[in-house]
Image: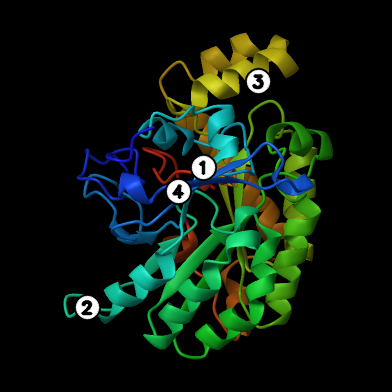
Amino acid sequence: MRWDNLSDHPAAPAVPALFDAETVTTRTFDTPEFRGVTFHEVRARSIVNRVPGASRVPFTWTVNPYRGCTHACVYCFARRTHGYLDLDTGLGFDSQIVVKVNAPELLRRRLAAPGWHGEHIAMGTNVDCYQRAEGRYRLMPGIIGALTEHANPFSVLTKGTLILRDLDLLVRAAGVTEVGVSVSVGFTDPELWRTVEPGTPSPERRLDVVRALTDHGFGIGVLMAPVVPFLGDRPEQLRETVRAIAAAGATSVTPLVLHLRPGAREWFMAWLGRHHPYLVARYERLYAGGSYAPTWYQRRITRQVHELADEFGIGPARRGAARHPAPGPAAGGTGGAGAGGQEPEPAGPTQLTLL
Ligand code: SF4
């Protein structure tokens, strides 16, 4: 494994070592939730990353305390960044988790440095900062604490219900600065969830997060990502998903069609071949032009979702009711999702990344 090419962004050039190899401690925990998972604890040299200028994401600074993600979404395009460490981008991404154990202390130092001017910091942009590892390592309370002390605006995008553990901290932060929270729910189909996002909390539990945060005055935008062609895009599926998102109290819904970038594409197509072999040829045709579905397809999905959003009454009109306003796409949008990942659609109507 190598620790000398560790930018979180797929488009970033190689950078000098961000971790000291001698500070890596490898651990496993014999508990059911972490069985089969290896943690590489590192002392990072920096924690606030500047998004490369070529990227068109709507934020400039990110903090990512983890690499790899046990949420194990098959389509996650942060998989590619695991390859920079000579780690496997398939199962290795799901089970070899790099933990930047000094993230809170590094962030505190950075926020206090004379060259820092209080810019917005986006989290959940590469991998999920509320993945299961956070239950053990508890890095986010220190990170939110540092941001609160410095009244530094920030946003979080997550699929993790663990964010509710830090609800009080988020409320406190929202009292002194702008705090955006977005939750990623691409579909509500239980079978699709179990197979394509096997390590994530169920869509229903994620919508419970939307409900709880809304009850505490946050305006929560839902990133409806990814919309999975031919598996999660039937009109009745889109309708049920938008209905459930609206019923949870979300202030907005932003659809994002599946990206299949190198690293994620191979893993996803192998999964597709095992679970839905009859769709392989259709996918090859739909993604023949590269990592993105054609613009006509993206536009069709976006139009359908926006019409449903209107029908179910979610959109900008409800934002005013929130004590802590929802992040717009600029504040809340990421990928890690894509989540993991953070490249926007090149030509589509949506300019968010995917968690
Ligand atoms: S898409 Fe997001 S939640 Fe899923 S594995 Fe990637 S980083 Fe984790």
The structure residue drawn at horizontal position 45% and vertical position 43%, both measured from the top left corner, is 341
Does residue 228 appear anywhere in the picture?
yes
Does mark 3's beta carbon lie closer than 8 Å to ligand 1?
no
Q: Do the residues labelled 2 and 3 touch (CB within 8 Å)?
A: no
Badge 3: residue crowd in 10 Å (few <14, some 14–19, many ≥20):
some
C-alpha span from label 1 to label 3: 19 Å
The structure residue drawn at horizontal position 27% and vertical position 40%, both measured from the top left corner, is 4
Q: Do the residues labelled 4 and 2 touch (CB within 8 Å)?
A: no
Compared across the picture, whether 107 is left or right of 278 comes to left
* Front residue of 42 and 126: 42
What residue is pinned by disc 2? Answer: 113
Percent x, y for residue 48? 32, 62
Earlier-in-chain disc, 4 versus 3: 4
Which residue is farthest left?
115
**Nearer the viewer's eye, disc 2 or disc 3?**
2
Q: Quadrant of residue 194?
A: top right
Does mark 4's beta carbon lie closer than 8 Å to ligand 1?
yes
Label 1 SS = loop
Residue 56 in the image: above or below residue 219: above
Earlier-in-chain disc, 4 versus 2: 2
What residue is pinned by disc 3? Answer: 271
Earlier-in-chain disc, 1 versus 3: 1
Q: Quadrant of residue 76?
A: top right
Label 2 SS = loop
C-alpha span from label 2 to label 1: 29 Å
What residue is pinned by disc 4? Answer: 126
Percent x, y for residue 258? 55, 34
What residue is pinned by disc 1? Answer: 68
The structure residue drawn at horizontal position 36% and vertical position 46%, both measured from the top left corner, is 8
Q: What residue type is labelled 2?
A: Ala
Q: What residue type is labelled 3?
A: Trp
